[in-house]
Image (tube, coloured by chain):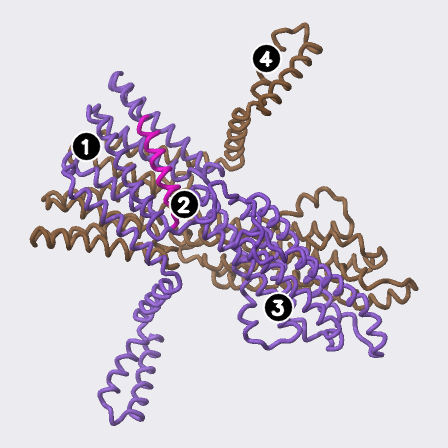
Chain colours: A purple, B brown
């Protein structure tokens, strides 16, 4: 009832407005009323919001629209292939069924994801198909009771063991999907083979060949039509995350010492993306290993090291989070003291973000930066200078002849300590990126 | 080659040993040799490690073994059901095929997961089945070219649009699996319906009823045979995470002011579980919404609020991470100063962890704690006392007649600031848990 009242009230308002303002154009006032009525309908609001979200998603990343078209292309191709082939009647249309099913479940957003699923599906279907055939052929040689026992027990044991194996981390990371298909295929072969049909071998063969055909079609479309490589995604994510840390750090220190810049305020929260990217980084690194050499990434590209770069970046992000939460304390710090350290704090933050941006460029271009050493040196000097400024703070307080409370200085001291801690954590990122450069044999950047 | 050499050398060593020590028992020496040979074989090592991991996983959480048995039970039941029924030949064994497939893909570890997949599968199969049938029936009325165009175009459009919809967060969270099954079923019905077979309706009906039967079997076994509820898992996770924060915080402060206790050292790293639990908390909360009332959780239990409790706990964990990284600085702080604040720091950490443990109990028992108010008050007092101690630090330094460098005091000041910041963040958890108590109408705890 409450909602209905609001609804009526809003329409009344709209009515008044239209009467006052738009009296001469009666036609337009009516259309505004309809529009207003629609605008307050909760269903219309939800649907509108849904379509807006969908639209923005596509505008921000057209590759998602392309992915939809790619899946549709694969589906249409494979169904037309089976329309044309006269195979339909050979076994109740099962061929086309498996092909369509394979396309729907195997086609993933990234090429690596499709490869992972396709290869797992092919491998598991082959293994379970032959195992199931073997068990069926053996069971058919025995009596009817033995046969049912052999089949039932083997199905139970295989389903239980393989389902359990899926919990083991190393299996889960590489062959989770394969395990599922293994149980599925084994179950199907056994169910079909119970009647001891002679065509069981043919059916299994057809299922295997259809799945191989469907998987290969998916893999080819996924890899050659506007491919999205999980490796490239991970590569871009890691370097953009490092850039985001730099932006947040810069913004935070500027906001602390000379607040008010809208540009900086916007960038303050960028570090948040880094906080929770662990799961997606790990799954992308897992998938990237299935991908062949592409672009600048060789076959044995060290994808695992990206996880470590991500971990060091995240450790840096945790500290930035704490730093930003100490920003509110700035008002309590006396102006004189704040000014005393502002120049060297700016220097630390700017050289920290220089190092971070240099790291991002190094990762993104996969070339050894010529400026890195000097940037790190500069950061060390800046930290040293900031520590000196802190050390001379008591002298300043004595000179100024004003009595300061230690409590007034503490927020600033904490802020600066955290800033220095962040510089230390950046050094950890530098170490891992150096290791990356060594393992992946980065060349020197050209701008020497 | 290098590996082979090491291998031979180790055998030689084993040989020498056996000759020196075990000369009288020639039989045992041989068995030791074989054991040693196996112990250095990389494949044997890997296999042994794999089985150890698998064994430990089961010992630590027997429910994972039970899950395997539950899936096996469902598989065996459904395949026996279709062995017994004479339906096998009605459409090339498709019935049993769909039933087996449904069990394999629908059965999830948690009851909620199985419900989510089962209901999505049933809903999507129904919708897409009827839509596909409708399109087929209409298309069959037209000429052969129109028919192919209608079918091809509708398949392409549906596949593209629904695949794209899966990217939208709200769809992804609730109906990702349903979308996949929608495309799958629509594709299957169209592929089967191309020949305009009259039995298309029967086949679709059979597929739908088999899928409903398979899904229901999964849901029943999942919910009634040793059920694992996603809601309960989430509930336990959230409260144990809060307990872990308390342990880490206690350990950190003890290690800082009176290091050496092994018990505390072990607990220091427990907070790490909290850092990266966002993804699993969100997916569990999503799944928990599908679960019916169970145990102490009603049908409309506010699962979403767990995500917020998780978020505030995580924000606390970030700060604890930074605090722990400042532990190494303790050696630089003069003993006199450290002693001055140690008592009140202990008080803050112990009352912080009291509040945290009280929060964990509140969440876990879903009863309003009678001690919470006093615990929070005590924490506030402790923080106040610590701030007073900090304030009186300059006087202490003057009294002691020793000259201290500000740089020596900074690490301690930072440590204490972070401790106070953690207390503030705990207050945020208290707020959200209070809100939880209000929404879920907690009763008062009995120990008044």
Residue matched to label 3: A252
Is B430 on the left-hand or right-hand side of A391?
left
Q: Which mark is residue B88?
A: 1
Chain ID for label 3? A
Label 4's element? helix
Disc 4/disc 2 C-alpha distance (Å): 47 Å
Disc 4/disc 3 C-alpha distance (Å): 67 Å
Disc 4/disc 1 C-alpha distance (Å): 55 Å
Give the position of the N terminus of chain A as an image quadrant: bottom left
Q: Is residue A114 magenta?
A: yes
* Part of the protein shown in magenta: A110-130
Q: Residues within 10 Å of mark 4 (few under 14, many from 20)?
A: few
Disc 1/disc 3 C-alpha distance (Å): 69 Å
Do the residues at discs 4 and 3 belong to one chain? no
Of the pair B321 and A390, the residue shown nearer to us: A390
Mark 4 or mark 2: which is in front? 2
**Residue A114 at x, y percent in the picture:** 36, 45
- Residue at screen point 38% across, 29% down: A158
Give the position of the C terminus of chain A as an image quadrant: bottom right
Mark 4 or mark 3: which is in front? 3
CB of mark 4 within 8 Å of CB of mark 3?
no
Q: Which mark is residue B31?
A: 4
Q: Which mark is residue A112?
A: 2
Chain ID for label 2? A
Query: Which image quadrant for residue A258?
Result: bottom right
């Amino acid at each position: 009832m409450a909602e209905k009242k609001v609804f009526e009230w809003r329409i009344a308002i709209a009515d008044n407005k239209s009467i006052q303002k738009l009296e001469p154009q009666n036609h337009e006032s009516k259309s505004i009323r309809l529009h207003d009525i629609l605008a307050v309908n909760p269903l219309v609001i939800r649907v509108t919001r849904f379509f807006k979200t969908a639209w923005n998603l596509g505008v921000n990343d057209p590759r998602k629209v392309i992915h939809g078209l790619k899946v549709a292309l694969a589906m249409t191709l494979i169904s037309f292939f089976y329309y044309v082939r006269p195979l339909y009647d050979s076994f109740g249309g099962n061929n086309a069924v498996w092909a369509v099913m394979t396309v729907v479940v195997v086609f993933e957003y990234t090429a690596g994801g499709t490869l992972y699923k396709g290869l797992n599906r092919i491998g598991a279907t082959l293994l379970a198909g032959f195992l199931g055939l073997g068990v069926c052929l053996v069971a058919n040689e025995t009596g009817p009771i033995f046969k049912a026992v052999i089949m039932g027990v083997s199905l139970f044991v295989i389903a239980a063991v393989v389902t359990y194996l899926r919990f083991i981390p190393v299996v889960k990371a590489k062959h989770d999907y394969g395990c599922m298909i293994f149980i599925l295929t084994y179950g199907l072969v056994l169910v079909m083979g119970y009647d001891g049909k002679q065509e069981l071998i043919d059916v299994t063969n057809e299922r295997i060949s259809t799945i191989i055909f469907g998987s290969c079609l998916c893999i080819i479309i996924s890899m050659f039509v506007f491919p999205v490589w999980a490796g490239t995604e991970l590569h871009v994510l890691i370097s953009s995350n490092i850039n985001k840390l730099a932006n947040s750090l810069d913004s935070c220190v500027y906001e602390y010492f000379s607040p008010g810049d809208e540009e900086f305020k916007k960038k303050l929260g960028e570090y948040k993306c880094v906080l929770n990217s662990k799961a997606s980084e790990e799954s992308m690194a897992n998938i990237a290993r299935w991908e062949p050499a592409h672009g600048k990434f060789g076959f044995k590209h060290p994808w695992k090291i990206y996880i470590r770069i991500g971990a060091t970046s995240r450790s840096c992000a945790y500290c930035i989070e704490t730093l930003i939460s100490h920003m509110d304390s700035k008002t309590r710090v006396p102006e004189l003291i704040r000014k005393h350290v502002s120049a060297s704090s700016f220097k630390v933050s700017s050289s920290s973000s220089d190092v971070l941006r240099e790291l991002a460029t190094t990762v993104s271009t996969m070339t050894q930066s010529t400026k890195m050493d000097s940037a790190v040196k500069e950061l060390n000097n800046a930290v040293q200078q900031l520590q000196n400024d802190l050390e001379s703070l008591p002298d300043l307080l004595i000179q100024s002849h004003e009595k300061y409370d230690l409590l007034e200085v503490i927020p600033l001291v904490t802020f600066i300590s955290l800033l220095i801690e962040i510089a230390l954590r950046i050094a950890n990122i530098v170490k891992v990126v150096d290791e990356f450069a060594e393992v992946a044999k980065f060349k020197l950047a050209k701008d020497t």
